[in-house]
Image (tube, rainbow, N blue to C red):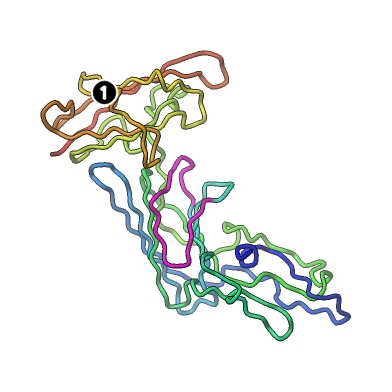
Amino acid sequence: MTNTLKYGLAFLILSQSASAEILFPVTPRNQLDANVQASVTQDPSSHIYTYTYVITNSPSSAQNISTFAFDINENAKIFNETAPEGWSFGRYASGNLFSFASTEGITESHIHYFPNGAHEIRSPFDIHPSISKTFSFQTLSAPDNGLIYIQGYVPSPQSTDEGDFDGVEIPSQYIKDDSFQTATIVPIIDIYDGNRRPAVDGFAAFPNISSASGSVFTAPVKIFLDFAINGETVNEATFKAELNGVDITSLFVVDNNLYSDRVLELALGSGSPLQAGKNVLITSVEGIVPDTERFATDTDRITFTVEP
């Protein structure tokens, strides 16, 4: 109920009155100015990125900040998100957007009633003018330049008679259409899928590998693997992997953290096929070529460097 009251564009009809009155008009949610400080770090062993954002609402803003969102890569998996008290994380049902919003911990006690019958929810968790709050998350997708969409809180439009809004143009409250926008760093770079045979490249992909060569890891090494990134039909039982000429298929195990489908973890040392310096990983898996009934094999050869 709280989310609907706070974020839905719903018109409250309080009574059928001869003296109709618009209690809260349709108000844009972009009446603010904000500063965004973004930083990105990468774990040298797993190549997991940590994105951190400090959101500051300007002293001159006319609205509190109640939600913000980013465009992201469609294959990006976001995990280990952190947010201040009262804020929650979610991904939009359509579009490649994820957001943080101050929707948690709001109760009936936060509803303020006015003498004329109108009401609004005053969240204690919004970012007020002159206040900063810090948010973070992790992902395997590399950063690039992008936009952040920031919305201020406004009460839902309310009237004493539904006819009050007849002829009123209702603008879109979709966050891309109605928000303060500014440049920042976001996870956009796509995961590496081999780039050898476009029809089958999606059978297997490596979200923490940047290219067929040039990736540098610090031991111990984690390499993540995803199957069927474009929804292809893949026979995972046919998957094979070889590192520096040694069969390591069984070492790609189910990723219990759900960062990917499978993960390989290797350290340097006696008996390990992982070696300091140059390493060559060769993988293969069978599947059905999209829009056909033909089976094919996606074979990838990846070279990466390991620093002790």
Q: Which residues are magenta?
A: 71-91
Q: Which of the pair 150/124 is nearer the observer?
A: 124
- Give the class, few, some or many, for how many residues have Cα within 10 Å of label 1's Cα (few <14, many ≥20): some
In percent of width and height, residue 191 lies at: 39, 37
Q: Is 175 situated left or right of 216 in this image?
A: right
The residue under the point 56% across, 63% down is 179
Q: Quadrant of the C terminus?
A: top left
Rendering quarter of residue 195: top left
Q: Residue 187: give x, y in percent of width and height.
A: 41, 48
Res 180 visible: no
Q: Is residue 170 above or below residue 232?
A: below
Q: Determine the secondary structure under disc 1.
A: loop
Q: Residue at the location (71% across, 78% down)?
A: 118
Q: Nearer the viewer, residue 171 or 10?
A: 10
The residue at which mark 1 appears reads as 248
Vertical position of residue 10 compared to residue 238: above or below: below
Image location of residue 40, percent across then percent down: 32, 54
Residue 87 magenta-highlighted: yes
Asked if residue 33 can be seen in this view, the reply is: yes
Q: Residue furthest bottom?
A: 115
Q: Quadrant of residue 165?
A: bottom right
The amino acid on which the numbered mark 1 sits, given as a three-letter code, is Ile
Which residue is rendered at x = 18% and y = 35% of the image? 267
